[in-house]
Amino acid sequence: MLIAILSDIHANKEAFDACMAHARRQGAERFVFLGDMIGYGADPGYVVDEVARHVAKGAVAILGNHDAAITEGTGGMNAYARAAIEWTEGRLGAEQKAFLAGLPLSAEIDDALFVHSEASQPQHWIYVTSAHEAERSLVTTQKHVTFVGHVHRPQLYHMAPGKPAVCFIPSPGVGIPLARSRRWLAVLGSVGQPRDEVPSAAYTIYDSSRGAIVFHRAPYDIETAAGKIKAAGLPAILSARLFIGR
């Protein structure tokens, strides 16, 4: 089965639609949304409704820290993130907030684990930015592959028995077989706010039958997405950074 995995959409309708369309062209049969549907962008209601619609049809959605902030507060967030959540809170209805509040911290499909942040303590929103965090996440589960988001920069870690985790940066569009002799942790890029200096939206397709993944990039209408952020009166950095992917 081809599973399209989208993380950190961040209320960016244009990037979200581009990734969904791209994934369908690749033959995606199922969707997983890896958290942070909202925050930063100007279309939170649209994204929440679309994700909820897909969940009703069998998709999986995971709670992200920005999603949780709607009901749990913005403690620990920087000023830009807090401003976006405060703006977003007033634009979501009760049903949309209830949907976000009901999302799980993790989910499993066959031999894969899905979580927004580091898997050993997902409620603490730890970033996987080094082999240290990757190893801590990998030893938590016996699943063959773990998918996380939160970092906004694509990375892939693998760990053989008795050896430390190793990281490499995947190339877009290149299939990567996930050897059964190792365990794997894929850190997805962001759909709605990439931070790896590539402005195109990022998502991943996992072939659960073959045990392989492909990291994809999808160009989208950045001008429109950025213009909406500016028109909403959100912090200027949230629109400016879309053009540079940082």
Image (spheres, helix red, strand yellow):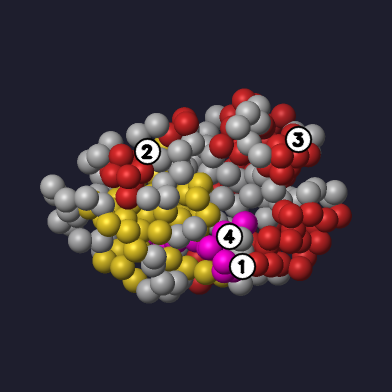
Task: Identify the residue shown where x is 71% and y is 44%.
Answer: 80
- Circle 3 is placed at which residue position? 86
For marks 2 and 4 on the same chain, the one whose residue lies earlier in the sequence:
2
Q: CA distance from mark 3 to mark 1?
A: 26 Å
Helix, strand or loop at mark 4: loop
Report the amino acid beneath label 2: Ala
Answer yes or no: do the residues labelled 2 and 4 have beta carbons within 8 Å?
Answer: no
Tell me where residue 161 appears, x and y as whole percent.
14, 49
Span colored in magenta: 192-208
Q: CA distance from mark 2 to mark 1?
A: 27 Å
Answer yes or no: do the residues labelled 4 and 1 have beta carbons within 8 Å?
Answer: yes
For marks 4 and 1 on the same chain, the one whose residue lies earlier in the sequence:
4
Tell me where residue 207 appears, x and y as whole percent.
33, 62
The quarter of the picture where the N terminus appears is: bottom left
For marks 2 and 1 on the same chain, the one whose residue lies earlier in the sequence:
2
Density class for disc 2 (Cα within 10 Å; few <14, some 14-19, many ≥20) is many
What label does residue 194 carry, if any? 4
- Circle 1 is placed at which residue position? 199
